[in-house]
Image (cartoon, helix red, strand yellow):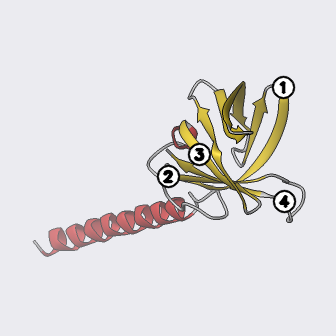
Amino acid sequence: MNKFLKNFTKMKNKKNLAYVALAGATALTVSSCGKYEDGPNFSLLTKKSRVAGDWELKSIGGESYGNVTMDFSKDGSLITTFTYSYGGQSYTETYSGSWEFASDKENISLNIDGDITVLEIKRLTNKDMWLDQDVTDTDGDLWILEAK
């Protein structure tokens, strides 16, 4: 019986060690999930799912752009709509295009009516998206988008 208890204790200790190793690996994986500088550190949604949807462009470089909406589709299509007033009249202009991630999913490329812009993703949640316009310069204009 004593031999049984020793073997049982060894098996239990190995099992506990396996749980500790699994917990450690999980902790490392979860803590490394944060790809973007300003978060989130963890999300159950895929990056593509967080981008897809209707967004309102709130500002670029601190300048307000509350009259621009961007509809990112999961299939990679993009529709950008500008609404503005001039001379007492309201106008709406719509541009079609596409979007795609760079291979590392740290940058997003927007093709709006043939004009391609590459933006560095700083924050990507299902509620807000922050994009840095100049990926080669730290003084780039930050695009702030909020989900509609």
Amino acid, disc 4: Gly
Q: Which structural element holds mark 1?
A: loop
N-term-proximal mark, 2 vs 1? 1
Quarter of the N terminus within the rendering:
bottom left
Q: Is residue 71 left or right of residue 127?
A: right
Q: Residues within 10 Å of mark 1 (few under 14, many from 20)?
A: few
| Percent x, y of residue 88 | 68, 39
Label 1 belongs to which residue?
A: 114
The reply to whether the C-beta atoms of the residues labelled 2 and 4 are less than 8 Å apart is no
Residue 33, image quadrant? bottom right
Measure the C-alpha gap from mark 4 to mark 1.
Answer: 22 Å
Residue 72 x %, y %: 60, 33
Disc 2 marks which amino acid? Lys
In the rendered view, tell whether residue 141 sits above or below residue 101.
below
Secondary structure category for the residue under label 2: loop
1 or 3: tag closer to the N-terminus: 3
Q: Is residue 105 left or right of residue 20?
A: right
Query: Which class describes the residues within 10 Å of circle 4: few (<14), some (14-19), or many (20+)?
Result: some
According to the picture, the residue beneath numbered tag 2 turns out to be 127
Q: Mark 3 points at which residue?
A: 56
Q: How far apart are marks 3 and 4 (CA)?
A: 20 Å
Residue at (72% x, 44% y) in the render: 104
Residue 140 is marked as: 4
Helix, strand or loop under label 4: loop
* Residue at the far right in the pictured view: 136
Give the alpha-carbon distance from disc 3 to disc 2, as whole Å. Answer: 11 Å
Residue 58 in the image: state x and y as whole percent. 63, 53
